[in-house]
Structures are given as C-alpha cells and as structure tokens.
Image (cartoon, rainbow, N blue to C red):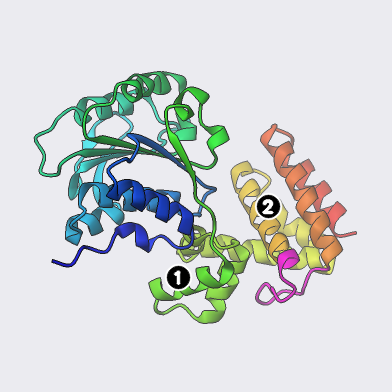
Amino acid sequence: MKPAEPMLNAVRGNERLRAELLAALSEDRLPHSLLLAGEAGCGAGFAARCLAADYLFPQGGPPAQNTAQGRVTQIDEKGELVTGIIREVLALRPVGKMNQINIAQIRTARRECFQSSLSADGRVVLIQGADRMNQSAANALLKVLEEPPEGVLFLLTAGSQAAVLPTIRSRCSVYAVSPVSPDECTQALLQREHQLPRAEAEYLAELFAGQIGSCLHAREPARRAALEKAGALYGCLAAGKEYEALVLLATYEKEKSAAIAVLNDVSALCAASLRSEAFRVPGQPAMPPARAARAVQEIGSAVRRLGANASPKLVLTLLAAELCQ
C-alpha cells in the first residue's frame, strides 16, 4: 500500500522545519513537548495541527484531514469539553476578558489526556497562544510536562519563544515557523481561494510579508473593511492632507483598541511600500519613502503611548500633524 502523504507537506515554506519533524516522526524520536514559535499569521497553528494529524493518523484519510482543519475537541473558558469530530486532540487557547489560558483549561487537559479509551494510539494536547498562559495555569502544565503520560504529545504555539515562560519553554523542543516569500504566499492564496484575483493575492502577500494566515483573515468582510479604512488614512498621510487625516482619526478617539488596530494596519501598508517600490494601495497615492519610514516610526511610538493609557484624542491629533508635514 502506498504510504499516505504527510499532512506536514501542506505547510508552505519552512522546508527545514518540515524535514526535521518528519524525520523525527519516522524514526520515532519526536519529543513529548514541542513549541512552535512564529508571529501571528505565519501558520504555527496550522503546522501544529498538521503535526498532530501525522502523529495520530499516519495512515492519513479523513481523520488526518479533520485534525489539520481544526475539527477537534476544544476546552472552553470554564474547562468544559466542546467535542469535535476528532476526540483525540484537545485544543485550548486564550479566553475571557484577560485573553489568557486559565487553570481550569489546563486541569481539564491533564485529566483527559490520561484517558486511553480512544481509537487512536495516543493523544495530542494543542495549546495555542502559550505566551498568554497565567501563572497558575503554567504551574499546572509544568507538572504534567515533567512527567508526561505515555503516548501524549504536547504541542504549544506562541508568537515568539521569548514570550513563553522560561519554565515552560525549557521543557519543550523549540521550532521556528517563518513567513514564506510573497511569491509563494501568492500561489498558496490562489490555490486556496479560487475566486481571488491574482492582483489582490499579490497585494495581500506583499502587505503581510508572506504571512498566509493574515492574508486569509484579510478576506473576511470585517477585516476587509478595516483595511479599507487604513488604506484611506494611508492615502491622506501620503498626500499630506492633515484635515482629512484628522477627520478619519477622530472616529477612533473613543475606541482605543480600534485606534491601535488601524494604526498597525497603516504601519503595515507603509512597511510594504518600503519593501517594494511596486507596491500600491488601491485607489491611493504612493507614499514617498522618507515619509513612509517616518510613519512607521511615529506610528510605533503612538501605539505605545496609547497602550500606556495616554489620551487617544491627543495622541491621534499629534500624529496626524507630525505625519502630514
């Protein structure tokens, strides 16, 4: 019988990562705890699900595909199970107002991963956003990582390995997940989104610097609308239209999180224009490189001030004046 195609082969780029993980699987030397670190949109979560699929279902088929697609059992904020198609994978992520992984979730994972009455030869505990784990949850997880149950694979993902608590990080083998090239990102988008025009795929791939997940998220209606607003603000700054920029920014004066989000998007647009001379925001004038570079720096400072509870109205007014000079 022909061996099943590994789900890890669906991970774009990251050839070394795929080769190392596939070799460890085939030689039965995969560590019991792994941390896949990569900035948002790089696909660390997808890579973790593909690894879980290959670990649990090396024969492939629907179980492996459902695992890679995230149709697994979730652990909610109260530590209760939301059963998915795949029961052998327990997935948890930051929840609640604090956007953290809590101890109730970890306790449920610990209890469930010791049960062995399931069809697959093993279990996987998938912890997404391990850098958002509170201290109590980390302490509870540490106990099971130190003495892991037989056949259970712990897969953690995070935006960066440095953001994960050292006690947890030291118990894991760490692998980096990197963005792909814009060209490879474009091809991935066109294969996944058959109705997507090539020009839009190329635009998204350059804007998000090869972060396939971020590009796919940008196709959602709410995210698309947010990017259009950022593009309009980018155009005002590019043309030095201070009044128009102030009018746009005024709508965010009472919504600090939304203000930070739109500023980060504008910064990404500026950064993309610096990376590629051919990059253009649809319907907007090109931003001079010197202004784009200054915008990235000034927007970064403004976001930090907003995060430190400075007055949004003051921060946004000063930013518009500075960038439209």
| Residue 204 horizontal/vertical position (percent) | 56, 68
Viewer-nearest residue: 199 or 56:
56
Q: Nearer the viewer, residue 279 or 258?
A: 279
Mark 2: which secondary structure? helix
Above or below residue 314? Residue 249 is below
Q: Quadrant of the N terminus?
A: bottom left
Taking the image as shown, residue 30 lies to the left or right of residue 80, namely right
Which quarter of the figure is the C terminus placed in?
A: bottom right
Give, as a single range, the part of the protein colored magenta. 273-288
Binning the other alpha carbons within 10 Å of mark 1 as few (below 14), some (14 to 19) or many (20 upward) gives many
Q: Quadrant of residue 239?
A: bottom right
Label 1 residue SS: helix
Residue at position x 56%, y 63% in the image:
210
Q: Position of residue 287 (x, y in %)?
A: 79, 68
Q: Main secondary structure of the magenta part?
A: loop
Residue at x 67%, y 36% (from the top left corner) = 307
Cβ–Cβ under 8 Å for marks 2 and 1: no
Q: Quadrant of residue 112?
A: top left
User: Which residue is nearer to you in this view: 182 or 251?
Assistant: 182
Residue 126 coordinates in the image, percent (x, y): 33, 40
Residue 251 in view of the camera: no
Residue 286, x across and y down, in percent: 77, 73
Rendering quarter of residue 257: top right
Q: Amino acid at mark 1?
A: Ala
Label 2 sits on what residue type?
Leu
Q: Residue under label 2, please give it.
A: 263
Q: Up-down: is 138 above or below 287?
A: above
Q: Is residue 287 magenta?
A: yes
Q: Is residue 247 left or right of residue 116?
A: right
238 relative position to 102: left or right = right
